[in-house]
Structure formats: structure tokens, C-alpha cells
Amino acid sequence: MNTQLENAQIAQARAADMLITKGALVELSHEDARVVVNYMTPRRFPAGTVLMREGDEGIDFMLLVLDGEVTVENAVHGDEEAMVVSVLNAGNLIGEMGLLDGGKRSATCVAASHVNAAVLSRQQLTALMADSPQVSARLLLAMAKRVVEHLRETNRKLLTFAQLSKALQQELDGVHIANRRLLEEINRLKAVRNLEDMPNRAIW
């Protein structure tokens, strides 16, 4: 029994360490992380499990990956298969925005391997807020900062994409101009050749 308790304590301590890594809530203190982890539920997911699906609503939880890999996928317009945009592993947090606002999930997350995770539901967050309002306030602030950083990163990616699209369009315009000039030259050469092939006739 003591061994089980010790193992549980070790697992909680490890989860608390992961909760404050760069991929999760780095703004949170270790002491606060240990309190938060006490309200989280350990879960195991077999490979292939869909943890959340893009567009789903009412999935009010966030998930801290402890072991394994999770693919983050987005639907591509006109394509039946989703595109993998990133792969998350131990120490990464998933679904904090949905926990905060209860809105639609922005991506589909699938267990790419066997995944061990710690889950915090809206109900557990509410209990934490009632029991430890100061800790929960710092948790929410850390989550909000993480969401803001995600939005900034998305804006940076959109700007980069826009710049690449502009450069690509310029390249395509250049190719079109070159093709048009090449076609004009081919037509000119054909016209010259046709003139050369015409039989010689006296002109009066």
C-alpha cells in the first residue's frame, strides 16, 4: 500500500514538473503546479484514440501529455485527409483554450502512440477555484498568457505565409511573362519559316 502511495506521489511530482515546462504553463510556480495536479485525473489512451475533434463543442477539458505522442491535425478544404500540423510529446498541454471558453475545438488531436496524460476538466477547475482561489487565479492567468502567445505565433505564421504567397505570386508572374515571350518567339520563328518555305514567284 505504501508503495502504491509513493508511486502516486512520484507520478504527481513528475506531472507537476511537466506542467511548468515550456510546452505547458511555464508562468506557473512549482508550488502552484503541485496544487493543480492534485485536481487532475490520470488517463491512458491507446494509439489511434481521437482525444478531441476539430469543430466539436462542449469538450470542456485540457490535457497534459506525460508520455507518448499526439498529432495535431487540421482539415484541408477540398481534401478528405487532414493535414498534420504538429506533433506534441511529453510536457505539452492540449485544449486549454477550449477549457477557458468552451468554444469549438480548433484542431483534431490523435494519440499517435500509447499516451499517458493528466486531465483537468471544467468541473475540476471549478472545484480548484472554490478551494484555492489564489492558485486558480494564477492558473487562469498562466493559461491566458499561453493562449495569447499561441495567437501571436499564429499571427507570425500568417504573416510569413502571406510573404511567401506574395513571393510565389511574383515568381509565377515572372514565369507567365517568360512563357508568353517564348510563345511569341516560337510564333515569329514559325512565320519566318513559312515565308522561307513559300515557292519563289516573280513579283510584277
Image (tube, rainbow, N blue to C red):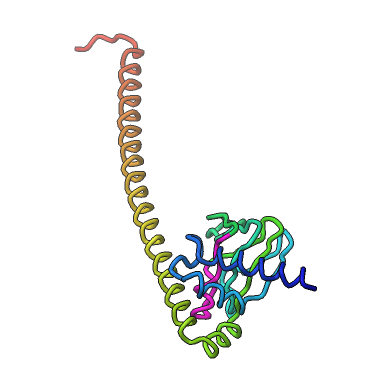
- Range of the magenta residues? 91-106
Q: As drawn, which residue projects farthest toward the left?
A: 204
Looking at the image, which is closer to me, 155 or 69?
69
The residue depicted at 48 percent of the width and 87 percent of the height is: 133
Res. 51 image quadrant:
bottom right
Residue 122 part of the magenta-drawn span: no
Left or right: residue 5 compared with residue 58: right
Classify 96 as above or below 137.
above
Left or right: residue 82 compared with residue 140: right
Looking at the image, which is closer to me, 9 or 123?
9
Classify 173 as above or below 61.
above
Res. 173 image quadrant:
top left
Classify 106 as above or below 172.
below
Q: Position of residue 99 (x, y in %)?
A: 53, 77
The residue depicted at 41 percent of the width and 61 percent of the height is: 154
Q: Position of residue 76 (x, y in %)?
A: 54, 58
Q: Quadrant of the N terminus?
A: bottom right
The residue depicted at 61 percent of the width and 77 percent of the height is: 38
